[in-house]
Image (spheres, rainbow, N blue to C red):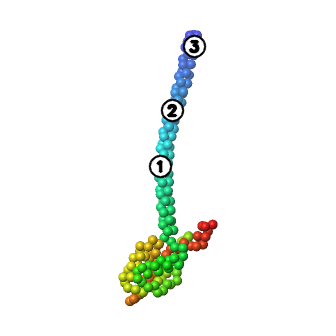
């Protein structure tokens, strides 16, 4: 009987050991699967992070290019603006002299718009001369390094004279004073 009892005890211990080992095996398998899942998620996140970094790098490059473009436009705008109305009138006078026109009358400046530190003003000019002189004058305006606006221009032709409105960009003086400080 004792032998039977030892067999049952041994059998019982063997079953308990098998159950314990099976549970350990299941737990190990579950941990291994979880590890693989986490490893895959980590790799996916690394890929997403790499993709986001590339996008950010592209956006940064685009932003830097846009900033360079804006700076170039600002430099060009600064070089094509005038400090005051007198400079513009001098340029128009020189163009009229070069094209053989007589400048007869200069009107008052009218504001078209004001934006931040710049404003667009238009002035009427009356000239006497022939059509060839007027053509030369318009050519000089077109080729001027200083921006002369003709988008809202008005031309009135008579037999021996013509009246034209021309615009120019002016850097507002009160903002220029603030920039110097």
**Location of mark 1 (residue):** 54
Q: Quadrant of residue 115?
A: bottom right
Q: CA distance from mark 2 to mark 1?
A: 33 Å
User: Which one is in front in this view, the residue at disc 1 or the one at disc 3?
Assistant: 1
In the foreground, 81 or 121: 81
Which residue has dot 3 on it? 5
Instruction: Say which element carries label 3.
Output: helix
x then y, percent, for residue 156: 42, 85
Front in this rendered view, residue 53 or 168:
168
Point out the image quarter for the C terminus. bottom right
Q: Where in the figure is residue 94, as x and y percent of width and height?
A: 46, 79
Q: Is residue 166 visible?
A: no
Instruction: Work out whether mark 2 precedes mark 3 in sequence or the reverse, and give the earlier one.
Output: 3
Q: CA distance from mark 2 to mark 3?
A: 40 Å
**Residue at numbered disc 2:** 32
Q: Which residue is depicted at the point 46% across and 84% down?
A: 103
Lower position in the chain sequence, tag 1 or tag 3 = 3
Q: Dots 2 and 1: beta carbons under 8 Å? A: no
In the image, which disc is placed on residue 9? Answer: none
Task: Report the quarter where the N terminus lies.
Answer: top right
Q: CA distance from mark 1 to mark 3?
A: 72 Å
Q: Residues within 10 Å of mark 2 (few under 14, many from 20)?
A: few
Using residue 176 as the reference point, say whether residue 50 is left or right of it. left
**Nearer mark to the viewer, of 2 and 1:** 1
Q: Residue furthest right?
A: 181
> First in sequence: mark 2 or mark 1?
2
Residue at the spot x=40%, y=82% of the render?
A: 100
Q: Position of residue 63 (x, y in %)?
A: 49, 57
Question: How far across and how far down the image is residue 28, in percent?
Answer: 52, 29
Q: Circles 1 and 3: CB distance less than 8 Å?
A: no
Q: Identify the residue at image location x=49%, y=79%.
A: 90
Q: Badge 3: how crowded within 10 Å, few (<14), some, or many (20+)?
A: few
């Amino acid at each position: 009987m004792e032998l039977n009892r030892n067999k049952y005890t041994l059998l019982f211990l063997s079953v308990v050991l098998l159950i314990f080992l099976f549970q350990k095996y299941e737990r190990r398998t579950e941990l291994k699967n979880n590890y693989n899942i986490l490893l895959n998620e980590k790799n996916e996140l690394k890929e997403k992070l790499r993709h986001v970094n590339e996008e950010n790098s592209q956006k940064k490059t685009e932003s830097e290019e846009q900033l360079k473009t804006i700076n170039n436009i600002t430099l060009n705008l600064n070089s094509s603006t005038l400090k005051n109305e007198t400079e513009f009138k001098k340029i128009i006078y020189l163009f009229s002299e070069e094209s053989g026109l007589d400048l007869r009358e200069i009107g008052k400046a009218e504001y078209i718009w004001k934006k931040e530190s710049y404003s667009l003003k238009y002035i009427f000019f009356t000239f006497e001369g022939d059509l060839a002189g007027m053509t030369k004058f318009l050519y000089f305006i077109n080729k001027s390094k200083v921006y002369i606006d003709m988008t809202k221009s008005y031309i009135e032709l008579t037999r021996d004279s013509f009246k034209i409105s021309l615009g120019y960009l002016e850097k507002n003086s009160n903002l220029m004073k603030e920039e110097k400080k």
